[in-house]
């Protein structure tokens, strides 16, 4: 599904990603962990198509297409979804208008007619229940005045609406209390199918109790320095990152 | 004969003197009574000149070109109202008042008198039928000795729209005033509106400015709104003329105790627009809302000057102006709030936010807060910026194209102001017009044959 080969990326001339290699197959859940500043968020931003990062080397294919040549919106329409670490507030743009535009742009890309207003609202209702998001939130402007937890739930709601093939959850657990974490993780798990995959970027093993990964990768200084199974996350929790940093 | 005029000012003064008979004949005594003072003031003040701080960003005199035709009696243009105007806003059932080139258009009468005592129609006609009522209010709150353009209007205005709301009457249906401009020649139009809201009366008023022919027009219009104790008047103005027009619009409101006055001016099309809004909070516990939105591109110019005068204690005013400027459009906002010495416990808020879509667009903004009382809550803020890149990327990351993302952001920016409109079908329709405007489509309602721009 996703194949990253020797990916290098810069911001303002400073190299952040220094040769990432990663293969993700349909149905797999990959966790990426790593200390602050290791390049986790840069990786997700580069995959989503953020212009401030410059890819200097390497290639990324997503479902057979050269991902790096696609615009951010086409990446989304191809089935890539980034759950933002810090979701953006957009005053004046209602959730309904935002989601309707997004869903219909996805449909147009697939050659489908736009959803009727009633079908769209029905879809919203279903997906809201699935991720246990408060109805009132979707009547408001996008993320405006949402609490940290509400913003993260809203990301998962958007994911439920867009049904991506590959979801990148960038520190979706940060700023969440235990209840919100459970709701968010349940939402992700309910959306899981044998075909779709996810990349879970996190600092803490706690999230991986809920979203169980098939693989755990440790990112350090712009490279994946260790790959293992979920036990690796437990080991990290136990020992911290020092043994990685010290190159043990 | 008067000497041959050499300036626009002299030309207009001599035009006045040469046509005074015709002007008075096609108006009413109350209006005629005020003319002399008007022209005297205009002689003294002239056009606001380059040194006028208030008109710093709009050069007035060159706009009063001599090639505009001026008519002092309504010209007979045969058409059926239904052929040119059909408002299909669902559930927006309104009382319709029409003017054509500044004269009230009979539809089918010049003055409507509703069973509940509400009167609306031609100002000249009302001044003939109710001379005392009109005389008691006409020309009482305008700044004739301060702004030459207002004085000029007082000298020349012959007709316009009159609205009277009797004590305690709550008018359910909004009154919709459609100002039409239609002519084969370039034309200058000056007219006057007077709205009187008696104690505890309430009404919503929608004013739409349209052009029906491609000729160039210059409009200089004064609207006076008198809101008496505990009355509530809400005015929504849609400026949607074509881009070869120039408009000077002066709105004066005087609020009495416990009254609420709201105005929301939406400028979509029009070449050069100058909006002056002057609100006097003349007694305690008044509430004022002054909102405005300008969506402009190409060489459009929209200049707003507001003056909220807190003369008495315990009043609240809330002001929000937004402008979105594309291409080489230019705009100006000067919002003055005056809190006089006696106006303790005043709450006055002002906000002016502007988005520039190109490097060539220009916006000049000047908030001006003058406070002479010591127990007040006031704030003002002005911003000029670009579309939020972070928000744009966020939307693109959800599959929304860059163009749609920009449109959604612009629409969201504008909706802040449109959302203040209380009448839901009107709000929805204006949202739709704003959306069309932003997409570069004709901002007119699809089933209305009127070509607004």
Image (cartoon, rainbow, N blue to C red):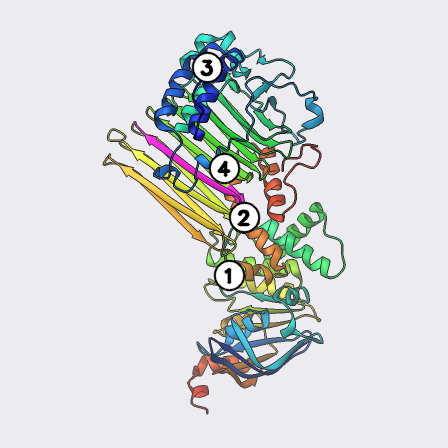
The residue where tag 2 is placed is B412
Of labels 3 and 1, the one closer to you: 3
Chain where mark 3 sits: B
**Label 4 and label 1 in one chain:** yes
Q: Residues within 10 Å of mark 2 (few under 14, many from 20)?
A: many
Does the segment drawn in magenta span residue B308?
yes
Sequence order check, earlier mark of 4 and 1: 4
Residue under the image location 66 percent in, 29 percent down: B87
Residue behind mark 3: B31
Residue B75 placement: quadrant: top right
Contact (Cβ within 8 Å) of mark 3 with mark 1:
no
Identified at 44% across, 36% down, the residue is B60
In the rendered image, which residue does mark 1 sit on? Answer: B390
Report helix, strand or loop for mark 2. Answer: helix
Badges 3 and 1, same chain: yes
| Inter-mark Cα distance, 3 to 2 | 44 Å
* N-term-proximal mark, 4 vs 3: 3
Residue A103 locus on image (x, y percent):
67, 56
Q: Are marks 3 and 2 in contact (CB under 8 Å)?
A: no
Q: Distance between the Cα atoms at labels 4 and 2?
A: 23 Å
Quadrant housing the N terminus of chain A? bottom right
- Which residue is depicted at the point 53% across and 65% down? A84
Residue B446 picture location, percent across and down: 70, 37
With respect to residue A234, does B208 lie above or below? above
Secondary structure beneath disc 3? helix
Cα–Cα span, label 4 and label 3: 26 Å
Does the residue at mark 1 contact the one at mark 2 (Cβ under 8 Å)?
no
Instruction: Give the magenta part as a residue range.
Output: B294-311
Q: Helix or strand or loop: what does disc 4 sit on?
A: strand
Q: Is residue B303 above or below residue B28?
A: below
């Amino acid at each position: 599904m996703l194949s990253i080969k020797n990916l290098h990326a810069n911001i303002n001339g400073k190299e952040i990603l220094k040769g990432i290699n990663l293969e993700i197959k349909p149905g797999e859940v990959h966790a990426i962990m790593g200390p602050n500043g290791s390049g986790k968020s840069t990786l997700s931003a580069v995959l989503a198509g953020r212009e401030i990062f410059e890819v200097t080397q390497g290639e990324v294919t997503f479902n057979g297409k050269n991902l790096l040549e696609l615009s951010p919106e086409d990446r989304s329409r191809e089935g890539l979804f980034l759950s933002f670490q810090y979701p953006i507030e957009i005053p004046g743009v209602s959730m309904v208008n935002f989601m309707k535009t997004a869903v219909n742009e996805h449909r147009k890309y697939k050659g489908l007619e736009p959803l009727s207003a009633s079908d769209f609202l029905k879809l919203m209702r279903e997906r809201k229940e699935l991720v246990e998001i408060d109805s009132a939130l979707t009547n408001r402007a996008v993320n405006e005045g949402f609490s940290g937890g509400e913003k993260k739930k809203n990301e998962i709601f958007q994911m439920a609406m867009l049904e991506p093939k590959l979801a990148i959850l960038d520190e979706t657990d940060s700023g969440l209390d235990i209840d919100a974490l459970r709701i968010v993780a349940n939402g992700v798990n309910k959306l899981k199918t044998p075909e779709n995959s996810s990349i879970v970027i996190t600092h803490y093993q706690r999230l991986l109790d809920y979203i169980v990964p098939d693989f755990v990768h440790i990112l350090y200084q712009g490279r994946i320095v260790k790959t293992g199974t979920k036990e690796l996350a437990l080991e990290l929790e136990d020992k911290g990152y020092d043994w990685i940093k010290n190159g043990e | 004969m008067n000497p041959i005029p050499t300036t626009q000012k002299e030309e207009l003064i001599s035009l006045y003197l040469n046509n005074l008979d015709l002007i008075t004949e096609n108006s009413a005594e109350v209006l005629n009574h005020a003319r002399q003072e008007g022209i005297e003031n205009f002689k003294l003040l002239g056009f606001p000149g380059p040194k006028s701080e208030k008109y710093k960003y709009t050069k007035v005199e060159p706009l009063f070109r001599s090639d505009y035709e001026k008519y002092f009696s309504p010209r007979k243009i045969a058409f059926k109202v239904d052929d040119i105007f059909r408002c299909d806003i669902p559930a927006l059932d309104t009382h319709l008042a029409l003017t054509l080139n500044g004269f009230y258009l009979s539809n089918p009468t010049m003055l409507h008198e509703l069973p509940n005592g509400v009167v609306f129609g031609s100002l000249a006609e009302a001044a003939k039928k109710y001379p005392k009522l009109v005389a008691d209010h006409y020309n009482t709150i305008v700044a004739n000795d301060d702004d030459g353009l207002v004085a000029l209007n007082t000298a020349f205005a012959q007709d316009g729209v009159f609205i009277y709301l009797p004590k305690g009457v709550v008018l359910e249906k909004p009154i919709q005033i459609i100002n039409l401009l239609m002519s084969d020649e370039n034309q200058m139009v000056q007219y006057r509106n007077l709205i009187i809201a008696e104690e505890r009366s309430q009404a919503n008023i929608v004013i739409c400015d349209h052009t029906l022919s491609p000729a160039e027009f210059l409009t200089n219009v004064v609207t006076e709104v008198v809101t008496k104790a505990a009355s509530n008047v809400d005015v929504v103005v849609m400026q949607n003329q074509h881009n070869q027009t120039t408009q000077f619009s002066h709105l004066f409101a005087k609020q009495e105790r416990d009254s609420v006055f709201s105005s929301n001016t939406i400028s979509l099309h029009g070449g050069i627009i100058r909006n002056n809004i002057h609100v006097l909070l003349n007694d305690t516990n008044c509430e004022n809302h002054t909102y405005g939105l300008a969506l402009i591109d190409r060489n459009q110019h929209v200049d707003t000057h507001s003056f909220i005068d807190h003369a008495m204690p315990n009043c609240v005013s809330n002001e929000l102006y937004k402008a979105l400027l594309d291409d080489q459009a230019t705009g100006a906002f000067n919002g003055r709030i005056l809190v006089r010495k006696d106006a303790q416990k005043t709450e006055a808020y002002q906000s002016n936010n502007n988005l520039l879509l190109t490097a060539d667009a220009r916006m000049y903004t000047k908030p001006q807060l003058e406070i002479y009382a010591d127990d007040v809550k006031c704030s003002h803020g002005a911003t000029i910026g670009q579309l939020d890149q972070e928000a744009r990327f966020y939307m693109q990351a959800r599959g929304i194209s860059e163009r749609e993302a920009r449109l959604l952001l612009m629409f969201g920016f504008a909706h802040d102001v449109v959302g203040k409109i209380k009448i839901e079908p009107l709000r929805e329709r204006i949202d739709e017009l704003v959306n069309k405007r932003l997409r570069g489509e004709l901002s007119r309602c699809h089933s209305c044959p009127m070509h607004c721009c």
